[in-house]
Every structure is written in structure tokens, then in C-alpha cells.
Image (cartoon, rainbow, N blue to C red):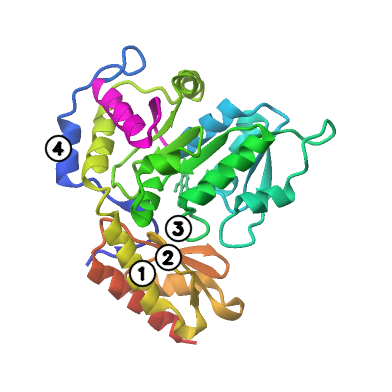
Amino acid sequence: MPPIDLRSDTVTRPSPEMRRAMADAEVGDDERDGDPTTLRLERRVAELLGKERALFFPSGVMANQAAVNLHTRPGTEIILDQDAHIIHWEMAGAAALSGAQIRPVLPAGPVATANDMRRVVRPVARHVTAPSLVCVENTHNGAGGKVIPVHEMRAIRAFAAELGVPVHLDGARLWNASVSLGVPLEDLAAAADTVMVAFSKGLGAPIGAAVAGTAAAVDELWRIRKRFGGAMRQSGIVAAGALYGLEHNRERLAEDHANARAFAHVVNGAGGAAVVPPDSNIVMVDLPGGRAAAPVVKACAAQGVLLSAWSATRIRAVTHLDVAALEVKRAGEVLAAELARA
Ligand SMILES: Cc1ncc(COP(=O)(O)O)c(C=O)c1O
């Protein structure tokens, strides 16, 4: 029996229907003329996010870093939640590629709010490092898929406006946020100047991300993408997978969220573990008394349940379209039993 793989929603494999859409895609040289399927995807993303244009990228990291490069200058600082993907998982790209410093904000609650940011940022003065960008991640991966509501997104936008800087939204899982809140994507995207969305996570596509913004921003992002080595040729093959995911796999994210809640229900309290109540498809399990996560993850893997040791004492499980409700429940039971084994 194949393992139940809850390490991430990036482990999904394209379905036969998605593969067929990819095989049948109309293609051209995207860098030279614009690939027709890629252009179609970019138009659809811009429309869904309520922005003028969008640009396809090979990965979310490249898309985030291109946006950072667009908005910042060397020697300026980016204000963002201390657990942001841009800080932990992007190889210090903001420093290495854009010469920008990170100002991590410790949140009072699960995710940094406008008030948390206001608390740590000094008033603009000539002897204070100049801010150039505020970033926000929705849903917030490191916080356990936490969803930031529209009013808080607007508050962060207002805080950035006080500083006179733009907002970049890392919306790798903005699809999940929109479904969880029951609000249109564009209501969340409206609070940001640029928005990154990813196709290779909950939507089940094999590759790709996009950044949406004004036409002028996307023109400049096109040059930055080329400089970063991300310009593509017959990208319609992969853009078709992303389009398929957009049209067929968005609404069903509600199932992943329900499965995450069911998993949390089974695991919470087992052996004293505390589960962060999931807003979307990510479940964080905190082990009690400094108990190590790695041996628990290893023991579950031996029973066919794959999880991530997110930190020394925290386990992450992510639900997605390749795991059914019964499998998620079984995974929860395996983890709960392992946690109960003192
Ligand atoms: C919140 C967030 N942003 C960005 C990324 C990067 O996306 P990619 O893996 O496509 O580079 C991820 C990947 O998991 C993510 O979770």
C-alpha cells in the first residue's frame, strides 16, 4: 500500500485529466512572442485577483524574490512576520539577490498584524534604516495555515501606506484563504500591490506560480524574471496544468480544510500534544515537555504515514487532493497512537 503522504500539498501528482490538458496545450515561444496558453493563464490570474496583469513564474520562490527585487533597493528593509516563508525558506534571497535587510516581526498572536508591525518599526528618520516593503503571507504556512481576514489585510495595507511603501502578498495558498473565508480572491488581493500565487500546492499542478500587479509592475517583473533565469519557452505545457488546477481544483479545497479539522480533532490532546486549530489545510502539532518530533515522525513513517518534523518539537501535516478523508483519519489515528506511547 502506498504511504499516506501528508508532508506537504506539493507532493500531489497531476491527474490523468490534467496531464491530458497539458499534452494538448497550444504552445509557442513565451520569451519571444508570448506562449498562447501561458498568456491565457496570466489573463485568468489577473482577472481572478482583480489586477491589471500577471506573469507566470517557474516557482513561488522565484516569484516572491522577483517581487522583492521590484519593490526594494539595496540597503533598505522589508517588514514581515518572523515566520514568513521569505525569511526561512528562500535561501536569504532578499539579502543575496536584492541587498535588502529583513525586519522580522514577532507576532502577539498567531500571525503578525498591522499593530505588531507598528510596534517594532521606528518612525522614518534619516538615521533609521529606510523601509521599502511590507510583506504578508496568506495563508500563513509557518503559523499553521492561518488565514488573515480581509480587515487585517486592509490594516496592514494602511500601515504600509503610513510608511509610504508597497505591500507584497505571498499568496502561495491564497486559494485556501479565499475558500476558508468565503470571500473572493480579489478582496484579499486588493490589499497588496503585488500578489504571488502558486499552482503547485493545493491546486495540484506540477509546476508554477504567478505574480499579479499593475501593467507597469509586470513589465518590470518580466525583465527581472529574465535576469533571474526564469524566462521560459513552450511554457504552455505547464501553464495548462496550472489552468486546469485553477478551474477544477479550487472549490474542492474546502474538502482539504475539513480533512485537516478531522485530523486535528483525532490528534489534539494525544499524549499531551496541542494542535493549532487549523483554518485551512495545514495542521501543526506541538509536542509536550520538549519531546522530540523527529522520532515520532520516523515511527509514523514506518507505519506508512508521512509527516514533517517542522521544528524540534513541532510536527506538520498538510492535507491535499491526493489524500482522501479516510486516509487522513487513519493518519491522525497513527499519529495519535504514537503520541500516546509515552
Ligand atoms: C507560503 C509559501 N510561499 C512560497 C513558497 C514557495 O513556492 P515554490 O515551492 O513554488 O518555490 C511556498 C512553498 O511551499 C510557501 O509555502
Residue 70 is situated, as x and y percent measured from the top left of the image, at: 56, 26
Residue at which label 4 appears: 20
**Circle 4 or circle 2, nearest the eye:** 2
Image mark for residue 278? 2
Gap between marks 4 and 1 measured at Cα? 33 Å
Q: Mark 3 or mark 2, which has the lower sequence index?
A: 3
Gap between marks 1 and 3 measured at Cα? 12 Å
Q: Mark 3 or mark 4, which has the lower sequence index?
A: 4
As helix, strand or loop, the secondary structure at mark 4 comes to helix
> Any magenta on residue 53?
yes
Q: Which quadrant of the rendered structure holds the N terminus? A: bottom left
**Circle 4 or circle 1, nearest the eye:** 1
Left or right? Give the position of 315 relative to 44.
right
Three-letter code, disc 1: Arg
- Using a 10 Å C-alpha cutoff, classify the residue at mark 3 as few (fewer than 14 neighbours), some (14 to 19) or many (20 or more): many
Three-letter code, disc 3: Gly
Residue at which label 1 appears: 261
- Using a 10 Å C-alpha cutoff, classify the residue at mark 4 as few (fewer than 14 neighbours), some (14 to 19) or many (20 or more): some
Q: Between residues 51 and 288, which one lies in front from this camera angle? A: 51
4 and 2 marks in contact (CB < 8 Å): no
Residue numbers of the magenta segment: 36-59
Q: Mark 2 or mark 1, which has the lower sequence index?
A: 1
As helix, strand or loop, the secondary structure at mark 2 comes to loop
2 and 1 marks in contact (CB < 8 Å): yes
- Using a 10 Å C-alpha cutoff, classify the residue at mark 2 as few (fewer than 14 neighbours), some (14 to 19) or many (20 or more): many
Q: Mark 1 or mark 3, which has the lower sequence index?
A: 3
